[in-house]
Structure formats: structure tokens, C-alpha cells
Amino acid sequence: MRALVVGGGILGLFAALHLAREGADVAVLERGEPGEWSRAAAGILEFTRFSINRISARGYPASYLRMALRGDARIRAGAPGARWVLSYLRAWGREPPSGMWEAVRWLGEYSRSEYRAMAEASNDFEYAEEPLHEVGGDVGAALEEARRDPLSPRVEAGECCGMESLVYLDAARLSTGAFISRILGELRGLGARIVRAAALGVRPASGEVLLEGGRTEGADAVVVAAGYRTRALGVPVAPFKGYGFLTGARARAMFVDLRSGIAVVPLRGRSKLTGRFDLDAGGDHSPALRVLRRGREALGDFAVYEMAVGYRPCTPDGFPVVDRVGSVVVATGACRLGWTYAPALGRLAADLALGRGSPGALGAGRFGPPRGVPESVPI
Ligand SMILES: Cc1cc2nc3c(=O)[nH]c(=O)nc-3n(C[C@H](O)[C@H](O)[C@H](O)COP(=O)(O)OP(=O)(O)OC[C@H]3O[C@@H](n4cnc5c(N)ncnc54)[C@H](O)[C@@H]3O)c2cc1C
């Protein structure tokens, strides 16, 4: 069986890994460096913090809007797109479709077991299950709320960086750069090819990919996991841009600071610094400087070794989509939980490509009836 995966972000790489493990002849088409956009992520894995999905839908876009009104951010016309905004307004305040909480619980469990298994085989990507501290919020109120929420992750009060913290006990972290090298090695070991090529479009009706020079590639299965660009296939996905810095800052614990909007992940000899949606808002590099400035306020001066730019591919309700459009499997990524859920979403995408399983709650139908299968779309 021959499979083509368009997009070598973390989701496309996991879809390719599952397909290659099943014996498929796999090629990943990636327009830039594999993992180029995904490596910006902090690398915090929150397998049991399901409420973040809701926050994605309600809190952050509102915060983006507030910043835009204050003149601190620019929302570029065309992004996130009229269909996205309309679906977002429809999703506002609503419970997700039935089965969604069960589906995301499975995404978390499956993904944790996959990362654990890969780390047990060889922990060359700095995987560690350790608590995530949240500082700068009202810890008492958050604990009270957690006690009332049946989906709450395990939390307790703690201390981090000289401040009272809320501690999420079931978190983990990894080095995104090291993990991308690891998964590429594993893919090559299974005979998969990583091809530097931009797919110019896809033909959902026939399952072909259009390449430069008017060439077309067909396969028994095509998976499109091109981040926010999957929206070309009719699934609403917005590009929430963000910046990740590898720094020489010293941090003793993994923490998120709610007031300054930064996240810090200690790695071997370095630490990863990222900003929250609202810090990352805007269309140029000044938001990147804002993230750095907040980082220096929290951690003192430090060297910067690397900067990566990435996107959080977010649907209007904050939950991912894995579905079929004609004979093509579409996988959107999972907004700010893209790394957390990638092993499981890759598994679902691979299963659909192999003709198994069904999208269930993660189907695109929750954003309205299917629009028919287009002959050809540019991506
Ligand atoms: C600052 C920041 C911090 C984050 N922190 C975390 C975190 O701590 N934990 C977590 O779980 N998630 C986090 N995320 C979210 C996570 O990084 C994303 O959800 C995830 O990377 C999305 O992966 P993806 O593979 O779906 O898409 P992408 O990473 O967007 O990858 C898509 C790939 O497709 C390629 N592509 C696009 N179009 C084409 C084409 N036409 N032809 C060929 N290739 C194409 C692109 O070049 C790209 O490599 C963070 C994101 C950001 C920006």
C-alpha cells in the first residue's frame, strides 16, 4: 500500500509513523524543513487537562480581540476567515457534541502511552513526566473550581519561582527539536521517505496531489496534515501564530505565568520560552520581542540560541478534526494541544487512510453539512 502525507508537522509525522509501522510505503511531502512550524511549541504535554480545549474556543480569541481593540495586535484580513468566525460564534457557549469529552480523553491516554513507549525505547528527546506550575492566578479559587469539575485533572497547591502556584500533576514535557530528529530517524528506519516538495493542491475527488511542474502524484491513500492550510479543504482552521525561543535561562521547574503570559520549560542546559496566544498576537516580529521581554522580566538576562515561528491550527470550537473529504483524509492538528494529542490524531488519520475506524465526534460535520467533494483545491 502506498501512502502520501502532505505536511511534515508533528501530526503528519505521526500519521506517517503509524502508516509505516503497518508496512505502508510512505512518503511525506514537506515544503520546508520537517517540523519547521511545530518545533516552536513549548513542549508541554497536558494529557488530562481537557478544559484547555474550551479555553481555546472562548478565552483566547476574545483576548486577541481585546488586544486588537487596544492597538496591541493586528488581526489580518483573511485570517482566520469568515467561515471560521461564523462557526466560532455558533460554538460560543455551547457544549461540544456528545462523545467529544470521551474522544479527547482517549486522545490524551493514547498519546501518553505512545510518548512513554518511545521514551522507554530510547529517551533521546528529554521526555519527563513532571508537574506543571501555574503562577499568577487565584490558586484557592482554581482549586475550588477543580473540585466541582468532573473532568478536572489532578491539581494541588504548591510553590514555584517564589510564588504560590497551582500544580497540574499529570503533565509531561519534551524537547520539540530533539523529538523531531528522533521521529525522522524512526521513519527513515522504516523506509519512509521525507521529500522536500510543496504540494500545490489536492484533488479530493480522485485522491491525487498536484506538484510543481504540473506533475501529479497518486497513492492508495493521501493524508493532508498541512496545519492551518488544511482549511483549503473546507474545514475551518485559523492560524494562531506563535514564537518559541531556546534560551540559556535557568529555570528549576516547568511553569506558566498567567500575568505575564509566558511558559517556561527547563531542558538540558537550556530552557524553552514561549508566549500565550495574546502575547503572540500581531502580524510582525514585535510580538516575538514582547515574549522575550516578559521572559527576561521573569528570569533575568539570558542568551537566545534559536527562534522558531509556528502556528496553532485552531478550529472554532478548539477541538481537532480528523475526517475524510472525498478520498483524502484531513487532519487539522489540535490548536494549542497539538503536541499533546499528535500521537493519537496521527493514529486516527492513519486508520482512516487504511480504511478502518470512523471520525466519530472528531468529524468535520459539527461545522455544518459537508459541502460536496471539490474536484481540485489549491493548498
Ligand atoms: C508558541 C507555541 C507554543 C505551543 N506550545 C504547545 C505545547 O506546549 N504543547 C502542545 O501540545 N502544543 C503546543 N503548541 C501547539 C502545537 O505546536 C501545534 O498544535 C502543532 O505544532 C500543530 O502541528 P501540525 O502538524 O498539525 O501543523 P504544523 O506544525 O502547522 O505543520 C504543518 C506542516 O505542513 C507543511 N505544509 C503546509 N502546506 C504545505 C504544502 N502545500 N505542501 C507541503 N507541506 C506543507 C508546513 O510547512 C508545516 O511543516 C504550541 C504552538 C505554538 C505556536
Image (spheres, grey):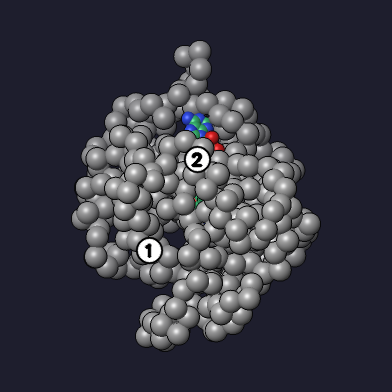
Residue under the image location 77 percent in, 58 percent down = 268
For the residue pair 169 and 121, the one nearer the viewer reads as 169
Does 221 appear above or below 203? below
| Residue 86 makes an appearance in the image | yes
Q: Looking at the image, which residue sits at the far top?
A: 213
Does 253 appear above or below 233? below
Q: Quadrant of the N terminus?
A: top right
SS type, badge 2: helix
For the residue pair 66 and 122, the one nearer the viewer reads as 66
Answer yes or no: do the residues labelled 1 and 2 have beta carbons within 8 Å? no
Residue under the image location 25 percent in, 42 percent down = 83
Question: In the image, what residue type sits under mark 1?
Answer: Ile
Q: Which mark, residue 207?
A: none
Q: Which residue is mark 2?
A: 286
Q: Which residue is mark 1?
A: 55
Does 14 appear above or below 97? above
- Classify mark 1: residues with Cα within 10 Å, few (<14), some (14-19) or many (20+): some
Q: Name which quarter of the figure residue 122 lies in.
A: bottom right
| Residue 350 makes an appearance in the image | no
For the residue pair 155 and 256, the one nearer the viewer reads as 256
Of the two numbered discs 1 and 2 on the same chain, state the one appearing first in sequence: 1
Side (left or right) of 167 relative to 21: left
Residue under the image location 50 percent in, 40 percent down = 286
Side (left or right) of 94 relative to 347: left
Q: Can you tell me whether the CB of the residue at mark 1 lies under 8 Å from the nearest atom of ligand 1?
A: no
Q: Position of residue 98 (x, y in %)?
A: 29, 68
